[in-house]
Amino acid sequence: MAGIVSIENLRKSFGSHEVLRGISLEIQKGDLVCFIGRSGCGKSTLLRCINGLEILDEGSVTVVDQRLEHKKGEKIDPTEFEKKAQALRKNCGMVFQDFRLFPHLSLLDNIVCAQTIVKDTPKDEAIEKARQLLSKVGLAAHERKLPSQLSGGQSQRGAIARALALNPLVMLYDEPTSALDPELVDEVLQTMKQLDQDGMTQIAVTHEMRFARDASDYIVYMEEGLIVESGHSDQIFSEPKDERTKQFLRKFL
Amino acid sequence: MKFRGLTRLAAFVLASLSASLTHADTPIRWAADTESGAPFVFQDPKNPERLIGFEKEIIDGVAKRLGRPGQFVQNSWDGLVPGLERGNYDLIINGLEITEERKREIAFSTPYYITAQQLTVLKGTQGIASLEDCRGKKVGTLKFSLAHRMLEQFGGIEAVTYEAETNAYADLEHGRVTAVLIDAPIAQYLAKPNPKLELVGGPIGEILYGIGIRKNEPELVAQVNQALADMVRDGELRRIYDRYSLWNPLMAKAFKDPGPALEGPTMYEYFLNATQPNRSRTMGERLELYQSFLPILAKGAVTTLEISVAAMCVAVLFGLILALVRLYGPKPMQWLAITYVELIRGTPLLIQLFFIFYALPHLGLKLSPFFAAVLGLGLNYAASESENYRAGILGVPRAQSEAAAALGMGRRQTLRYIVLPQAIRIVIPPITNDFIALLKDSSLVSVITMVELTKLYGQLASTYYDFLGTGILVAGFYLLLGLPFVRLARWVEVRMSLQPGTQIDQERSWMGAARTRAFAWVRRPSQASE
Ligand SMILES: Nc1ncnc2c1ncn2[C@@H]1O[C@H](COP(=O)(O)OP(=O)(O)OP(=O)(O)O)[C@@H](O)[C@H]1O
Ligand SMILES: [Mg+2]
């Protein structure tokens, strides 16, 4: 069955270094998927290819109804690619390890501007929506603060709210808790769990194995630009098929 | 009866029509540099808003005879000839020597004054009475003057040139030069009354002053010559020279008028009376004097401010366009912007001002002095501002643009809503500094006939022989002009960087903290990015 996100034979190099070496993957609507693997195996690159932040060298990525593709040997026009990627991002929110709230805007304005600029939402409507989202992620009291006045966990929840404001069908997270103090990790993961219950499709690169095991529906284990093994999280964690997966997980659990 | 009345009316109408065709009421514009301009054209020491000088009286006589009102245009000495060619005024009368070189550029009236060079030394100097004696020594003179050339051609003398004659004599007093060689009338007015200085030797060479007129206006030359001839014939010219005590044997011979003076040297005495006590004013007199400067300097300050603010607006807008083109424009446009910036930054502002004001008219673009000043300063500072913007834009972490892109913003939206607002905050402090620098650089526009603070300083200080007190006064005006902008910039910086309604009141009381805080985030994301 075709998923909400589908990746076919994706390849990506930086210079002579082939970082993704032929990735194919289907992601089902409503799943919380975790990409796991050793540092440098290509998880972030794969995630960034899904919303076109990296230009594909070969293969295709489809998110909902928008498709980015590049056939081997074909010349690519970056402007053209960026245009298609922009269309695809309508359905695709992204959260970064370092939050990336806009420092010159208050928390509320961060969430409002995303809507007014990208979707032309009328201002009062955007404010109302922003307030709803802020209370959903537990930040209603902080809406007037500048990003520099927020803690890491608050910032990351704010970033999630900002992405959600555009009504994405898929959310991408690149190590959303790695920059956080341990006691703040949970509040972010809690937010993601809550979104999972609401039926959001989420893809997260993570080193939080406990979270991957307990909260996710599907696991993708990667090594050196290839998917070694993927499957339901119960299966991957309790009976991994591949020896390499076993070894990797043994270190964590 | 009726018929005759009609003809008379028609004749009257025709006469006034033809009169207007020959510019009967259009003023005749004449230029001079009044800065240390005695005895030519200078500010009345007793009333700085009034012009006096023998050339002022001559030009009044000429204008009267041309039947046109005279209109004075201030220009710096260097710019007098280019300004004439450019059409800023119709006549130059400012001790302009008739030389072969100048005759190639402009036409001259018949000479209205004949004089010689005069050597001046410190009182009591032994053994210097001629140019011969000056070999191996430093001799001061005016830049671009005949005396300057004479010194260079004489050989063996080191010529030191000055913009203003008062400065040459001041340096003589301070011992920086051994002698000063300047036109005799200047020596008579500025050196002779000075007890520390002494005129030595006889007249050197012969100098003819003529009124400068554009080459393509032979009728005007003829009219001016006619007016001068009339003034010689009816004795008005002689009387002017008598009043200024400037009639000399050379004049007597050339104008065949060896007779005794027709009038007493009233203006010379007036000048001496008014300026002599300058050297020994009491404190109270000084304060009174400075008080009389205030309204004049205030006017100059307004001009300085207008030019600077307008030029800064040009610089801030055009600089932004340059920076954007350079960063995001198509390749050929990028090169154009780079070339522009390098060209402007690699050449002196003074040359650029001259070029805009005096050279562009040859290409058909003639700007008023004000617009030329604004454009010159604005285009120059745009180059610096574009570099500031570029640094500011590049100083916004790439992570920010990426986050905007991930939200679905296009390149333009990202630039406009995310990158530029952050860049502006980085750029406000350097832009404020540049504004202060521009305020000071605006003093250069006196070369294109603008009279602003610095020009007024030169004029007032040289008229009253008071560089110290006037200087402090003018410096005060510059500081007062700059201060509000420094304050405004700080305020904007604080306003833009902190959200109202948060606990920042203590920080506001100490701007430094606000600044540190405002820039904390500039550093933070770049540290945190992968
Ligand atoms: N923009 C880039 N230019 C060049 N090389 C890059 C670039 N981005 C990533 N790489 C390289 O590609 C490889 C995969 O990087 P990627 O960031 O996808 O790894 P990762 O699995 O996310 O690792 P980590 O867990 O440390 O984040 C690494 O060797 C990295 O050095
Ligand atoms: Mg990564």
Image (spheres, rainbow, N blue to C red):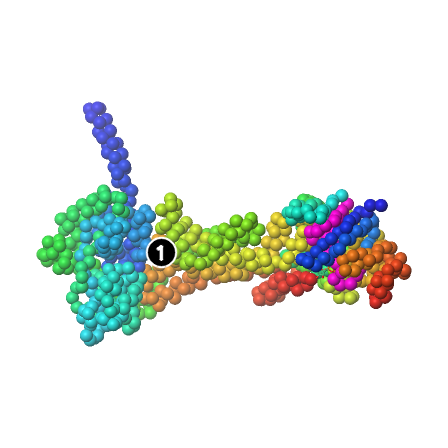
On screen, residue A200 versus residue B75, left or right, reads right
Please name the residue shown 68% across and 61% down the image: B529
The picture quadrant for ligand 1 comes to bottom right
Q: Which residue is mark 1?
A: B447
Please name the residue shown 83% across and 49% down the image: A28
Comparing B526 with B149, the one in front is: B149
Q: Is residue A60 magenta?
A: yes
Q: Does residue B364 show up?
A: yes
Comparing B224 with B40, the one in front is: B224
On screen, residue B474 versus residue B510, left or right, reads left
Q: Residue B448, percent across and down?
A: 36, 53
On screen, residue B8 versus residue B350, left or right, reads left
In the image, what residue type sits under mark 1? Val
Look at the image and give the residue range highlighted in magenta: A36-64
Q: Does residue B450 show up?
A: no
Q: Residue A100, percent across and down?
A: 69, 58
Q: Chain of mark 1?
A: B
Residue furthest left as drawn: B259
Please name the residue shown 25% across and 64% down the image: B152
Q: Is residue A195 magenta?
A: no
